[in-house]
Amino acid sequence: MKYQGVIFDLDGVLCFTDKYHYKAWKAVADEIGVYFDEQINNRLRGVSRMDSLDIILERSTKSYSAEEKMQLAEKKNDLYRALLADMTPADLSDEVRDTLNALKKAGLKLAIGSSSKNTKFILERIGLNGFFDAISDGTNISRSKPDPQVFTMAAEFIALPPTACLVVEDAEAGIKAAIGGGFDSAGLGEAAACGKATYAMHSFKDLLGICL
Ligand code: B16
Ligand code: MG
């Protein structure tokens, strides 16, 4: 096999929480009177919570203290988690579930590499709690994508060098992180269209052809 491990981004790859991020940020932006739309929301893909807030506040005329920013981010996260609570294992597609099972059965080590601090909660909601060999997420990193740290740590957790792992991403920031860390990458959506991924995928199951 070409790779011994696969590191998956979570939001936009295994499940789709964009609409929840959007709803929660929109409520916060409306409350402080800052314009926010779905196009701006697209810029938040793969970006950490505090960096996302900075992008939203680019349109604000008021400047916010670090403490005020923390409060806004906390408010967004409370709203976001309340929406995540509605997710169930039905939010994991059959295609993703079957592909993950086939990769695992073939003996590949599988890990998560996500910027989200809500990774474990989301995995629980969609019925993937305990499925992965390792989880590297927003709770163990100090630098977010496009820095490679989240993937470098995931590879360390599964005891493989970057050259033996494939990173699967939906965000250009994530592909840049993979390149920076010396990983091959497979892109979906924006990450496929950016032209920087090792493989451009049309569908999640394309991983079977790449890895097996
Ligand atoms: P949280 P990923 C990223 O997850 C999301 O794409 C991004 O929109 C979000 O701001 C970030 O997680 C932080 O999420 O607020 O839950 O810590 O795509 O890296 O799995
Ligand atoms: Mg993503």
Image (tube, grey):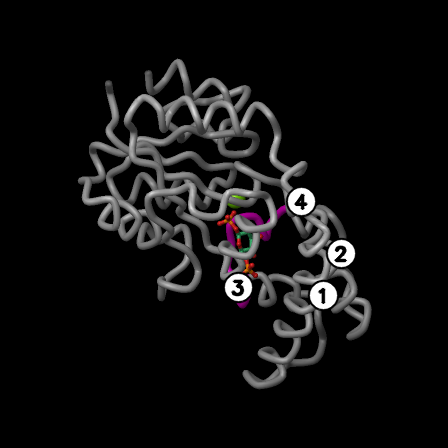
Tell me which amino acid carries mark 1: Leu
- Label 3 sits on residue: 51
- Label 1 sits on residue: 79
- How far apart are the two marked residues, 3 and 4, measured between alpha carbons? 28 Å
Q: Earlier in the sequence, mark 1 or mark 4?
A: 1
- Residue occupying image coordinates x 36% and y 36%: 167
Look at the image and give the residue range highlighted in magenta. Answer: 42-51
Pointers 2 and 3 in contact (CB under 8 A)?
Answer: no
Tell me which amino acid carries mark 2: Lys
Residue 102 among magenta residues: no
Q: Is mark 3 within 8 Å of ligand 1?
A: yes
- The percent coordinates of residue 26 (x first, y second) are 76, 60
> Along the horizontal axis of the image, is 178 left or right of 188?
left
- How far apart are the two marked residues, 1 and 3, measured between alpha carbons? 18 Å
Pointers 2 and 4 in contact (CB under 8 A)?
Answer: no
- The percent coordinates of residue 39 (x first, y second) are 70, 46
- How far apart are the two marked residues, 2 and 1, measured between alpha carbons? 8 Å
Where disc 2 sits, the SS reads: helix
- How far apart are the two marked residues, 2 and 3, measured between alpha carbons? 17 Å
- Residue 18's place in the image compared with 200, above or below, is below
Question: Foreground residue, 109 or 171?
Answer: 109
User: In the rendering, which numbered label is found on residue 88?
Assistant: 4
Tell me which amino acid carries mark 3: Asp
- How far apart are the two marked residues, 1 and 4, measured between alpha carbons? 17 Å
Q: Earlier in the sequence, mark 2 or mark 3?
A: 2
